[in-house]
Image (cartoon, rainbow, N blue to C red):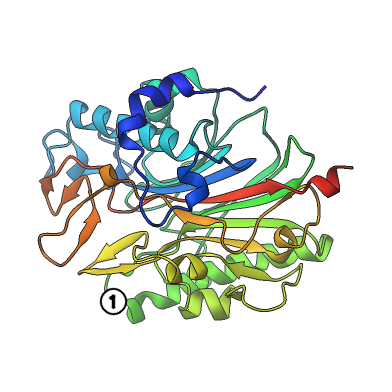
């Protein structure tokens, strides 16, 4: 049974002031039948030293003086954001990146008002040298995992990986639709965009190989790819290697379409701001089948949104306009939410296909 969380949102209602990146229907209270959220939460580490990870700066005596109080506050802020994105119901699925371990996921779910929810967790420790992972929350009465795997990313045919894996989950919804979900956090642009591009192209090719295997078995597969790609929708890794195009032509079932390209064009904001320039690093990419009414749940090119209420933003004192209110600015604790804005995808029932 789908749970109502109105009592939680009473305390959150002052926070839910939607920006122009929201649709008017959302402001009026319309909620989709199925909502999927992705959120880069900006370095959610616990306060304990892990000798297998490079987590020294996020310790009480580390360079960032990361304390238990700061950790709890950040978990609370992430939980509030998840609840606010849900509207009057929590998102059915939540993809996360930049979390250290299972303990931090438990911190979000069980040390905040979300403890009254019933989310389940899919997560695995990754080989990332900094110790940051991807993960998935799901409502077990709305999504039923069938298969889970973690795609290991290596470079130059090495057997050793030093970066986070791509999470793949195949599952059925309560409407009997089968979804193929991918949660991504591709290698960063550290060292320069062009110098590091080969790493993101490797991630794209790994993902594309898995997508092709799914399409081989089912040309109408409903695929949803979410994540922080550390590239923009028009970069080579996404357009050439992953073969995700803008949905402005005929929609083909077994092709990939990047909804973030539409979202970026239709908003003055994006998911991330770097040196005064907004860009869509956080994206949803879907198979054409999801937009061609193959099954009960479907979406449309304009159903990806940036969640940008005022409490996630602040005045940009270094450049013009506003920016995400982040946890740290350099090594200075700022006490905000994240340096990324959440993005989400709405799915709707096709009532004609339910008969």
Indicate left or right for 60 with 302 as reference. left
Residue identifier under label 1: 192
Residue, far right: 355
User: Where, by quadrant of the figure, is residue 55 drawn?
Assistant: top left
Report x, y in % for residue 178.
76, 46
| Number of residues whose C-alpha sits closer than 10 Å to that of mark 1, classed few (under 14), some (14–19) or many (20 or more) | few
Indicate left or right for 291 with 206 as reference. right
Q: Nearer the viewer, residue 246 or 303?
A: 303
Is residue 156 at least partly visible in the picture? no
Is residue 119 at least partly visible in the picture? yes
Residue occupying image coordinates x 30% and y 67%: 278
Residue occupying image coordinates x 32% and y 61%: 272
Report x, y in % for residue 268.
34, 66
User: Where, by quadrant of the figure, is residue 292 drawn?
Assistant: bottom right
Q: Nearer the viewer, residue 258 or 241?
A: 258
Q: Nearer the viewer, residue 265 or 224?
A: 265
Residue occupying image coordinates x 65% and y 40%: 33
Residue occupying image coordinates x 38% and y 32%: 79
SS class of the residue under badge 1? loop
129 relative to 122, above or below: below
């Amino acid at each position: 049974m789908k749970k109502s969380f109105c009592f939680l949102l009473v305390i959150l209602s002052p926070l839910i002031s939607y920006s122009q990146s929201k649709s008017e229907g959302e402001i009026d209270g319309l909620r989709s039948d199925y909502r999927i959220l992705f959120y880069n939460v900006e370095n959610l580490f616990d306060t304990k030293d892990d000798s297998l990870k490079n987590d020294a700066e996020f310790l009480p005596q580390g360079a960032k003086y990361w304390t238990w109080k700061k950790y709890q506050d950040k978990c609370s802020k992430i939980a509030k954001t998840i609840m606010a994105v849900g509207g009057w119901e929590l998102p059915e699925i939540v993809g996360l990146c930049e979390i250290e371990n299972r303990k931090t996921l438990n911190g979000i779910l069980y040390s905040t008002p979300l403890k009254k929810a019933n989310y389940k967790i899919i997560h695995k420790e990754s080989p990332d040298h900094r110790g940051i992972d991807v993960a998935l929350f799901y409502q077990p009465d709305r999504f039923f995992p069938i298969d889970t795997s973690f795609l290991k990313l290596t470079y130059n045919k090495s057997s050793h990986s030093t970066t986070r894996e791509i999470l793949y989950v195949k599952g059925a919804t309560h409407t009997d639709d089968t979804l193929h979900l991918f949660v991504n956090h591709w290698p960063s642009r550290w060292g320069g965009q062009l110098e590091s591009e080969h790493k993101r192209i490797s991630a794209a090719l790994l993902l594309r190989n898995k997508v092709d295997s799914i399409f081989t078995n089912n040309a109408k597969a409903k695929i949803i790819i979410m994540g922080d790609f550390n590239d923009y929708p028009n970069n080579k890794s996404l357009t050439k290697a992953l073969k995700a195009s803008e949905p402005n032509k005929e929609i083909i079932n077994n092709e990939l379409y990047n909804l973030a390209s539409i979202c970026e064009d239709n908003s003055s904001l994006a998911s991330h701001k770097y040196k005064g320039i907004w860009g869509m690093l956080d994206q949803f990419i879907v198979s054409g089948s999801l937009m061609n009414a193959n099954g009960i749940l479907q979406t449309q090119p304009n159903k990806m949104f940036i969640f940008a209420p005022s409490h996630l933003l602040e005045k940009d004192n270094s450049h013009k306009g506003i920016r995400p209110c982040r946890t740290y600015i350099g090594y200075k604790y700022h006490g905000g939410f994240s340096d990324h804005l959440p993005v989400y995808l709405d799915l709707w029932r096709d009532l004609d296909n339910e008969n």
